[in-house]
Image (cartoon, helix red, strand yellow):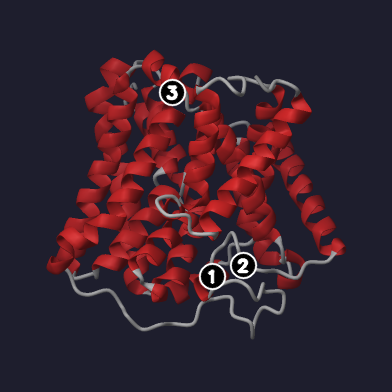
Amino acid sequence: MIDSPLALLATIAGVVVLALWLERRRVPGLWKLGATLLAIAIGGVLSNVGLVPPASPIYQAITGTVTDLAIVWLLLAVNLADLRKAGGAMLVAFGIAVVGTALGAFAGAFLFGGAIGEETWKLAGALTGTYSGGSLNFTAVSRAVDMSDALFVGATAADNVVTGLWLAACVVLPRWIGRYYPAPPSSPDAPPASPSNHPGRDPDLSDDESAHPLFAGASVSTHQLAILVAAGLAIMIASRVLATVTPAINPVLWLTTLALATGHAMPSGAKRGALQLGNLALLFFFVVIGVYSRIAEVLAVGVQVLFYALFVVAVHGVLVFLAGRFLRVDIGTLCVASQASVGGPGSALAVAVAGGWRSLILPGILVGLLGYALGTYAGMGIAQALRGFGF
């Protein structure tokens, strides 16, 4: 077993590199999962076969400070004004997806609350967060509501299983039900990171890869990196100070709000590299999430948690595709928006690329980033609402 802190950290870094390589090289049967799910899956394999320990101070550091920095850096890169580029249909579809998630989590509490117990409201909030913008929000909400360690690791494993299943569903559903919806846009819109507007772009990347949030190039100076590190740490400290002054407001909400406000106040040049740093930190977090995804932990908390997560995504999916049919939204937009909600921008891009919908790449990334911004608020809202109902 790899239990040395330095060796364990090196192993996690190696998993990140491997996950990125598998996606970039388009290894058959694997690359469509995306680096995010690959990092989770590889981490899960290492943990379940006993190569890495189930707990370590390294994991605590990554899910704590490193994850906070990932939240800050990714939100610094969010420009809400850019959402107009996503288009009305994508924004509407994403809004329906988030509403579907919230409804599923709320209704599921009444179905599964008796089996899950007194932490039902916490789990509902975490599931709302993760299926409104990705697993980063799961951890943010879980920490905010002080979820028990046992439920956290079991729910994390269930979340990873359901997210993987829904990613596969969004890839194959267009083949099964696509004829009932308008055709996806086929215009080959220019990707957001072309050689002409990104001098630092890797010339070896394809057009789709240059649009990918994990592969897009960025020319960043040491000074700019120093600004991002300093800004990230300053926002973390400020959020904790404000939380002590206003105990009714959770530090995670302060962290999210301050990062969004700072990102809009900073000059664009000062934020260059924030997306790359945030994604790197996030991939380390996803490897640890995979390590926590132990089959024994799912069984320990009960399969009801898995059924709850499945129910939330099922309600989400039914609402997205029924409403999309009524509103005549094309199948590609629905699948990409749904995956942006459930899995985040990286998963949304994977679905857009797998479907051949290049014009949906940038809109999918944009609403995925919006999910990072909204997921924590949505999760906390559902958690507190259900707590008021006695869950």
Expressed as whole percent of the image width and height from the top left, the position of residue 296 reads 43, 17
The image quadrant that residue 364 belongs to is: bottom left
Within 10 angstroms of label 2, few (less than 14), some, or many (20 or more) residues?
many
Amino acid type indicated by mark 1: Ala
Q: Is residue 178 above or below residue 33?
A: below
What residue sits right under mark 3 in the picture? 154
- Left or right of residue 54, residue 384 in this image: left
Q: Which residue is at a point 23% across and 56% down the rendered structure image?
A: 173
State which mark lies toward you, 3 or 2: 2
For marks 1 and 2, the one nearer the N-term is 1
Q: Residue furthest right?
A: 223
Amino acid type indicated by mark 3: Gly
For marks 1 and 3, the one nearer the N-term is 3
What residue sits right under mark 1 in the picture? 211
In space, the residues marked 1 and 2 are separated at their CA atoms by: 6 Å
Q: Is residue 303 above or below residue 286?
A: above
Q: Looking at the figure, which quarter contains the N terminus? A: top right
Q: Are marks 1 and 3 in contact (CB under 8 Å)?
A: no
- Left or right of residue 218, residue 174 in this image: left
Q: Secondary structure at mark 2?
A: loop
Expressed as whole percent of the image width and height from the top left, the position of residue 198 reads 67, 78
Q: Are marks 1 and 2 in contact (CB under 8 Å)?
A: yes
What residue sits right under mark 2 in the picture? 216
Q: Which mark is residue 19?
A: none
Amino acid type indicated by mark 2: Ala
The image quadrant that residue 187 belongs to is: bottom left
Q: Which residue is at a point 31% across and 36% down the rendered structure image?
A: 105
Q: Which residue is at a point 26% across and 56% down the rendered structure image?
A: 172
